[in-house]
Each structure stands twice: as structure tokens, then as C-alpha cells.
Image (cartoon, rainbow, N blue to C red):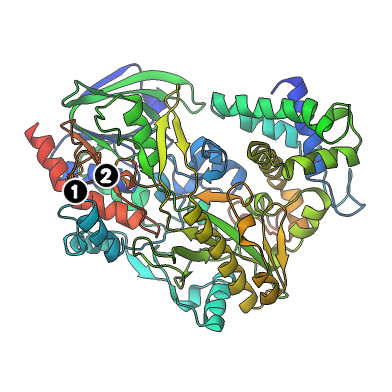
Amino acid sequence: LKRLTRGSEIPGDLTLEVDAVVVGTGAGGSIALRELARAGLDAVALEMGPYSTSADFDQREDRMIPRLFQEAGGRATADMAIRVLQGRGVGGSTVHNTNLCKRIPDPILSLWAGKYGVVGAGPEDLAPAFAAIEQDLTVTEIDAGARNANNDVLRRGCEALGWRGAPLRHNRVGCQRSGFCELGCAYDAKQNALKVVLPQATEAGARVFSDVRVMRIEHDGARVLGVHGVAVDVQGVPVASVDVRARVVVLASSAVGSAALAHASSIPDPYGQLGRNLRMHPGAVVAGRFDARIEGWRGIPQSYECTEHLSHDEGSDRRVWIVPAFAHPIGAASMLPGFGADHMAAMRTYPNIAVLTAMVHDETRGRVTAGDDGRPVLAYEMSEQDRVQLAKGLVASARLLLAAGAKQVTIPAVPPLRVTSARELDAIDLAVLRPHSVPLTAVHPMGTMRMGEDPKASVVRSTGEHHQLRGLFVVDGSLFPTSIGVPPQLGIYAMSLHLAPRVVERARAG
Amino acid sequence: MSTWQWAVVEHAARRITAADRPEGGPGSVVPTSDEVDVAGFVDGWVARMPERVRRDLGRFLAYLEHVAPVGAGHLTRFTRLPADAQDRVLASLEASSQPLLRAGFEGLKSLAFIGYYRDARTWSIVGYDGPLVGRPEGGWR
């Protein structure tokens, strides 16, 4: 990456004066940075994590998880019920995700316009941005020939039950089907922020600083003045302070990071909206043991979906998205219930296991604040309605695995539930399937600085600019007023591109 | 980690990664958690964690060492219990009615398995052939 400076390369305390500073370099931040630079503005991006290239991605869980994930993969909600996997490093979560590209569903965009007062971001407004991003990232459907055995289990289950299922679209070119997508692509096949968008941004003149943690947004209560951060070396030891004065500050550190930074910076929040309305798209897994070898760690991890139980209508009782979710041995060992001899015996069946995950298009409203050290604190207590959806999703996943030929299905609850037939499945008490009983994971936080025209019910305007603080923009998943029920990366890229003219306009005008 | 925390992790990891077949032990097909230095790995991992995570882990390890055995009917600290009693203590945490204790157990279990299954010697146990990057001729061993 041209015009990249690592934290360890900053010779001493650094002060910059630019037109715009972008905090975070994932889907939203990379696009904002590129569009600012292409408009001829002096723009820099600050990224808290390290810069990696394909040569760094060694396909080892123990080394890549701490490198690519926040808090070494250990981030969780305050009550420890939900593990929250989020990216860190240049390229953000686009580096470790599995390349799923789904547009924000039209009913969701219409809901935002109708109920949440979002202006100018309806299906027709966003269509050009989606089309442009899909072209930038070379988004294509994964054909049947590239579908691995774990994904084919889901297809077979859907067909056997007559449930709605379909291939997924991805941003990958030259994929070697190694199956290590979640640990970074060693083959540079991911057409993501790191590979595509940030190089375009720096080619246009933008600068990127890695290993710089922004501690505070500087402002005078009415407009932003810049940011203050700290650069660290490869060991995480602070080496320099970094102060950037700018007319525009663009937050793109995720619905968790951006809201926590805004809290830590005491930005105006007269109606107490900041950090509220956290949605997580939480999910849990179900494993099926087959006679045949699945070897789910090989091939493209997620290329098929089941949408039989997913409706994007508000208040629907069908709010579960089911996709394959295979893991490498460390992830699988953590997911399987129990420990000791029984656990190792179960791990010996690893090559014969297929895994699905049920993710809830949630309506629970959590909250992100900042702790004393400025790091995010996530409060999220799943509502009873969402818990019911989770339970239904786990049972539906188990039904799919059995329909595809699984000899035994395990729902890793405490105690674990093991069934060998649909009849046994019908007898399960769904009330036992709840947070803390079932290990939950969330990878799609959204909604903590949501957009809308009413300052009493939103944090930023429909333009992405903060209601009270001129020059502060948000371009990540924080913007979304609700869960979108699908992976958000494409939606974040597109929303950032859609809002970019407003960011550019403000950076020019001051 | 402190010396006592190291000891608690070492003892817990031995039980969490215990082999399902009698051949487990030095020089056998199934390496022990001591052979792959799970405690040492956890020590390095935890050192990179934020202060509040280290503090929470320390509290959980103290609970495991001093309080959880009492709850499972033992008046001896965890690290001085025989293996079968340690298993019962760990099982009581896994099935605890207290969500934070269950979460603490799951966290410790995850750390133990990261430390264990990171080692190429464990991969043949589960039929995994390991990363393609850097794979030695003849495969990982």
C-alpha cells in the first residue's frame, strides 16, 4: 500500500493539518477516504490495528485471531453471553470476513424511510451505489462447482424439506478454495478494502496510518476540530502522540468502536441517543455428524443460504437466516460442548461434521458505552421475542442437517442436546435454548449512531452528519436504524459511497 | 500470569484436553497439554489482553482455585485435588446456574483449546491436515 505509515515508523509526536480525517479503514472508511482523495482533498485515515499483506496470513488460528480480531477474539458483551468478533487492522473486518455480498433488503430501506425518517436512502437512491460497489469488488455468484460439502449439506437439507435456499454472491477473484478466509486470504483473492479500495484511495493521494488508536474527537461543542490519538509499535507500546486537525472527522470504526469513541469524546448528545439501539445479528451453531466425510474446513466457507425462516418485515415471526459455519480445529473445539475425554472423542469425528449457524435478525436494543479506559462496553440482553427466534432457528438448523442425512445432531447447549431424528427434535423444550445456555456469537453490530431527520430519535442526519456537531460524519454500520438481517459489508460500502458527496461537500466548505 | 495463576491454568488445561484413550502421555500419539505448553501459551495470550480482561480472568482463576472446589464438596484447593475431582469441579462450573461462572469456564476452555490445537502434533487426532501455507513436504507432524 502506497503512502502507508506504520505506528512504529512515526519518528516522534506528530501533528497534521488536513481537510478530513477518517477513523477506521474497513468497508465504510476505505470508501470515504477514496472519495475524499478523488475529490482532490487532503485526507488521512487512522487505523488502530496493524497493516498486513497476504504474506502475513499464515492460516494459523493461534496467530491470525489475535492479529485480525479486536481484543484477540475475546471481545464479548458485558454479561459475557455473546462473543463479538470484529476486525482490526488495515481493511477492518473485510480482511477476515467470508466475502458475503448481500444488498440491504428493499423492505428494510423502505422501513427506514417510513418509520425512522431516513431521507434519500430508499431502494432507488441506493441502487447506483450498490451497482458501483459490486463492480469495484467484482461481486459474483458462487457456482455449484465451487460449493464445498458443508454448503452442499445445507442445499440438500433445503431441497429435502422444500425450504427456500439459494447460492450466495461473493467478492473473490482467483480463489484457491483453501477454506482459510476467516484468517485473511494468503492468495490475495479477496476483493476487499485492503486489496481494492485502499490502494485506489492512496493512489489518489490519501495517506493511511496504521497502529494509531484514536482516543478522542476534538470539538468545541458545535463543530469538530480534529482527533487525538496514540501510535503504538508492534508490541503495542505507545511511541508517539498523533494529533490531526481537520474540518471533517469521519467515524468508520464499526457500530461498537465509533459509538465508544464518541462517548469517550463527550460529543453532544442532548437526547441520549448515542450508543443506543445496538443490534448484533447474533447467532449460534448446530453440528451434524455424517457417515460420509465432510471435511468442512476445505473450500469456500459460506456459499449457500437458507431463507425459509427469514422475512424482513418488522415484527415478523420469521427472523432467522441460516448459513454454513464451519471452523478450523480451535474454533470447533471451543464450540463443541464438554471437555476432557468425551470432548476429544467428539473431536475425532471432526472430518464427518457439518455445521450450520442460525442468525437472528434481531429487534433487541442493546447499548454501547465507553469504559474508564475508553474501550467499548457492550450491554445487550436478548429480548424474549428474539430468544424465541433463536430457538426456532437452532431447531430449523437441526432439521436441515437431519434432512440432509446427519446421523446425529448436536445443539451445543448446557447440557448439550443430541438428537437422531426429527421426532426427537419435536420433543425439545425450546425454553432451554437461551443466552448463557447456548454459546452465542455476533459478527454484525449495527445501529448505535443511527441516521434519521429527527434529532430526538437519531444521532446523525440522513446525510451521515451529526445532528449537533458540524463536520462529524458516520459511515459505518452505526448508521443503520435497525438490523438488516444479512451481512452488512456490502451495505456499509454502498452507504458510505452514497453519503460521500456530503462528506466531500463539507470538507470543501469547512 | 502469577505463579499460582499459572498453576491453576496448567491443572485445568490437563483436564480440559485430557485424552480419550489410554495411550495419552509423553511420547504417545496424543500429546499432553504439558507437552504442548498450554499454560505458557495462555500466559503469552493473556499478556496481550486489555487490563480489564486480565483482571476478570484473575478473578475467575481465584474462584476456580479456592471457591469452586467447596461448591463441589471438596475442602481442598483445585490444584491439590485428584484428577477426577478436578473434573467434577470443572463440570460444576460448566453447568453452573450463574451465567458469569459458565462464561468464565467457557473462556478458560477456549484458551486451553487454542493452546492445545495450535500445535501441529494434535492435528492428526482430529484428522485435520493443517494450513496449506508453509506445509512441509510430507505434511504437518
Q: Chain of mark 1?
A: A
Viewed as shown, does residue A132 lie left or right of A313? left
Of residues A317 and A7, the one drawn nearer to the viewer in this rendering = A317
Would residue B119 be seen by someone viewing this image from the given angle? yes
Residue A510, image quadrant:
top left
Look at the picture and state if A479 lies above or below A272: below
The answer to whether the residues at label 1 and label 2 have Cβ atoms under 8 Å apart is yes
Q: Residue at x 34, y 28 (%)?
A: A263
Of residues A288 and A65, the one drawn nearer to the viewer in this rendering = A288
**Rendering coords of residue A105 (x, y %):** 31, 64
Viewed as shown, does residue A343 lie left or right of A97? right
The residue beneath circle 1 is A499
Viewed as shown, does residue A499 lie left or right of A409? left
Q: Quick one: label 1 or label 2, which is nearer the N terminus?
A: 2
Would residue A178 be seen by someone viewing this image from the given angle? no
Check disc 1 and give the amino acid type: Leu
Residue A269, image quadrant:
top left
The residue beneath circle 2 is A475
Which image quarter holds the N terminus of chain A? top left
Check disc 2 and give the amino acid type: Val
